[in-house]
Image (cartoon, rainbow, N blue to C red):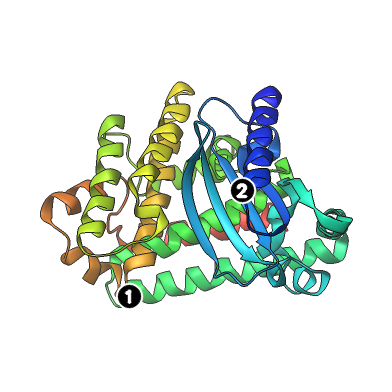
Amino acid sequence: MAQKSDELLTRAREFIKEEKRDITYAYVGGSVGRGEADEYSDIDLTVYRNIEVPPTKTDIIFKGEIIQLEQLHIIELPNKSRIEASPWDFRFLLEISIIKDEGGTLNAIKTWAIDYFYSEIGRNKMMEHVSMIVRERRRFALECVKQQHYYSATIAATGAWTEAGFLYLLYHYHSLANEHLIPRTQDLEVFHQFESVSPFKLDVNVSEVQQIMSHFRKHLREKGYAFNDLFELHDRLCERKIQRLLNKKEYLNILFQMYSEALWLFLETSEGRSFETYYDHLPRDLQKGLTKIGFVPLDDNKVKEICRLSEELLSLSI
């Protein structure tokens, strides 16, 4: 893994070197940044430019590798005041590999941030932030139950459990990897309880999951939406993620990861509509497909149980 990570970091540095526009800072995150890259890994590259550029995300091919490129202006560079105000939003600094850093500013911020995240003050602030997110999602889920909006209730309750899980993952395993959430919590009793009421059921063919996601992206493109996560290159990224998890026989994790991908697409294209309204306007075959990967309306008791379990999981980190 370390060798593959080094290879992809080299590609990222080569990309930076060949870029003609001014790049002041750059880092690689994800599996490459963590030193866990494998044959299925892409390069999550973030660059900060000293010129006016709109924030953009683009998937590109560079020397045979897929780069997920995010471009920001240097004004967006993390600083102490912003990190102190919202450490959970900047936790990515824990797992980045810096590949360009004029003046050493980014490395200094990263070093300071890591110390802060694991300090008593930083940890308490992070827990406070996550607790707020979990409880707001629980509140929304229970309000949706009252309104009999069971799709939205299920999504919100599952989101509360997931956020609590990410906090557990950070403080018990020092990891931010989404793909680690299921395998690192599956030995917990709270996970087994969640699994018994969750919207994820292992009665779908893995190859069908990828087809569902491709179909969803194609449908949204045909509706006129155009942003990075909809482009066909992103289908290749999903295929890689599925294949990696398939090799590990992490079947539930495949569903969870693709559910998360589909949820992001919904949030980016919902235009303020509830999931109930959004779902009703989808083609029937796409409705059926999304149901297979977890978009189902759980009943009152299951939604309330997931909400309860999210608090229980949260307590394991507090």
For the residues labelled 1 and 2, the Cα–Cα distance comes to 28 Å
Report the residue at 40% width, 50% height from top. Answer: 261
Report the number of discs.
Answer: 2
Quarter of the image holding residue 264?
bottom left
Q: Nearer the viewer, mark 1 or mark 2?
A: 2
Q: Give the residue at mark 1.
A: 271
Amino acid type at circle 2 is Leu
Position above or below: 10 against 223 = above
Horizontally, is 272 left or right of 287 in the view?
A: right
- Residue 307 x, y percent position in the rendering: 48, 62
Alpha-carbon neighbours of circle 1 within 10 Å: few (<14), some, or many (≥20)?
A: few
Front-most of 125 and 297?
125
* SS category of the residue bearing label 2: strand
Crowd rating for badge 2 (residues with CA inside 10 Å; few <14, some 14–19, many 20+)? many
Q: Residue at 42% across / 51% down in the picture? A: 260
Residue nearest the viewer, comparing 55 with 170: 55
- The three-letter code of the residue at mark 1 reads Glu
Residue 59 placed where, x, y %?
46, 48
Nearest the camera: 316 or 122?
122
Image side of residue 224 versus residue 260, left or right:
left
Q: Residue 45 shows which numbered tag?
A: 2
Instruction: Note whether residue 40 is visible.
Output: yes
Provide the secondary structure element on which disc 1 rests. Answer: loop
Residue 132 coordinates in the image, percent (x, y)? 61, 72
Point 59% across, 60% down: residue = 71
Examine the rendered structure and indicate whether residue 298 appears above or below residue 3: below
Q: Residue at x 68, y 69 (%)?
A: 76
Position of 278 compared to 45: left or right? left
Quarter of the picture containing the C terminus is bottom right
